[in-house]
Image (tube, grey):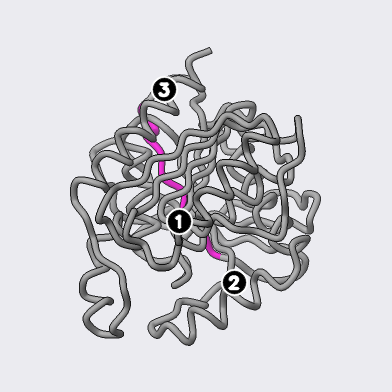
């Protein structure tokens, strides 16, 4: 396996980056890179996917992982986005090597990562800057999508006024101590949630709608009847059985939410 390492100059948020090109290609033209970077002295490992045969710069999409951490599912979503014509970066919110195999570990990692909203934003913004600086990316066109924990992260970035074109939350927590302010929310927002999701009850759904209406945000919310938490992840059923968790994969909800996401990106990036 040939590996090429590139050092990028330090940037704000103490961002230092080393890129390692992965060996295999998902398709003949798709490239994947394992990306090591630091934020405020802590090391993180992300994953970049893009088509190096496509001409010109294209929009970039950040992928924020579930509470388990930066895993294969997050990387697969980045690859799907690359196949759809985007450069995608599956970022790391926990730190290199922090990948949970038990819900208790996932809860601990999530609690540590979110103890300070400034820390959450710093880690997100470092990844955003890294993606925007990639040779294949038009840095003025960036979206973010997140799953479960990651869905809450991207919604909070929208609440904080981060410059994004679109934000997509899949079965993410919708409540937050941060409240959107009128005129501050910049991206168009899509939220996909399960009508039978015990982790995202209906009061969170209704509160989000009111919050975003009051803030003047452009929100589209889809609730799939009878669908449970983690509906996009084919591995959810195995986890549900192993840990007796109220989660389940739903093929139709996964398909419809993905198609809705691609339509959103095509629309917001059409200029």
Residue 14 lies in what quarter of the image?
bottom right
Residue underneath mark 2 = 95
Mark 1 — residue? 202
Q: Image quarter for residue 30?
A: top left
Which of the two labelled residues, at mark 3 and mark 1, occupies the earlier sequence position?
Answer: 1
Comparing labels 3 and 1, the label whose residue is closer to the camera: 1
- Residue in the image at 43% along x and 28% along y: 264
- State yes or no: residue 47 in magenta: yes
Foreground tag (2 vs 1): 1
Q: Secondary structure at mark 1?
A: helix
Mark 2 residue crowding within 10 angstroms, few (<14) / some (14–19) / many (20+): many
The span picked out in magenta is 45-53
Is disc 3 surrounded by few (<14), some (14 to 19) or many (20+) residues within 10 Å? Answer: few
Kindly report the secondary structure that dominates the magenta region of the rendered protein. Answer: strand
Q: Which mark is residue 266?
A: 3
Mark 2 to mark 1 CA distance (whole Å): 32 Å
Label 3 and label 1: CA atoms lie apart by 30 Å
Q: Is residue 194 left or right of 60 when viewed as pictured? A: left
| Depth order, front residue of 237/39 | 237
* Rendered image quadrant of residue 80: top left
Q: Position of residue 172 (x, y in %)?
A: 47, 57
Is the N terminus in the top left, top right, bottom left or bottom right quadrant? bottom left
Tag 2 near tag 1, CB within 8 Å: no
Residue at the top extreme of this rendering: 271
| Residue at 49 percent of width and 50 percent of height | 205
**Residue 60 point in image, percent of width and height:** 52, 35
Looking at marks 2 and 1 on the same chain, the residue that comes earlier in the sequence is marked by: 2
């Amino acid at each position: 396996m040939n590996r090429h390492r590139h050092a990028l100059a330090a940037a704000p948020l103490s961002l230092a980056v080393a890129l390692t090109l992965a060996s295999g290609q998902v398709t003949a033209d798709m490239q994947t890179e394992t990306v090591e970077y630091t934020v405020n002295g802590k090391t993180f490992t992300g994953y970049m996917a893009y088509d190096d045969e496509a001409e010109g710069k294209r929009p970039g999409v950040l992928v924020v992982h579930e509470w388990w951490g930066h895993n294969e599912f997050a990387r697969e979503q980045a690859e799907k986005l690359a196949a759809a014509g985007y450069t995608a970066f599956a970022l790391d919110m926990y730190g290199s090597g922090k990948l949970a195999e038990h819900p208790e570990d996932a809860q601990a990692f999530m609690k540590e990562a979110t103890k300070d909203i400034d820390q959450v934003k710093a880690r997100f913004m470092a990844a955003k800057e890294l993606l925007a600086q990639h040779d294949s990316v038009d840095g003025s066109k960036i979206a973010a999508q997140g799953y479960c924990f990651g869905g809450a992260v991207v919604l909070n970035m929208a609440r904080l006024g981060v410059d994004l074109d679109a934000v997509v939350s899949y079965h993410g927590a919708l409540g937050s101590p941060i409240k959107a302010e009128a005129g501050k929310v910049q991206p168009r927002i899509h939220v996909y949630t399960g009508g039978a999701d015990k982790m995202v009850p209906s009061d969170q759904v209704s509160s989000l709608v009111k919050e975003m209406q009051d803030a003047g945000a452009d929100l589209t919310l889809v609730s799939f009847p009878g669908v449970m938490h983690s509906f996009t992840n084919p591995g959810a059923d195995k986890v549900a059985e192993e840990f007796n968790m109220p989660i389940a994969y739903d093929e139709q909800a996964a398909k419809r939410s993905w198609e809705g996401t691609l339509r959103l990106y095509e629309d917001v990036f059409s200029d």
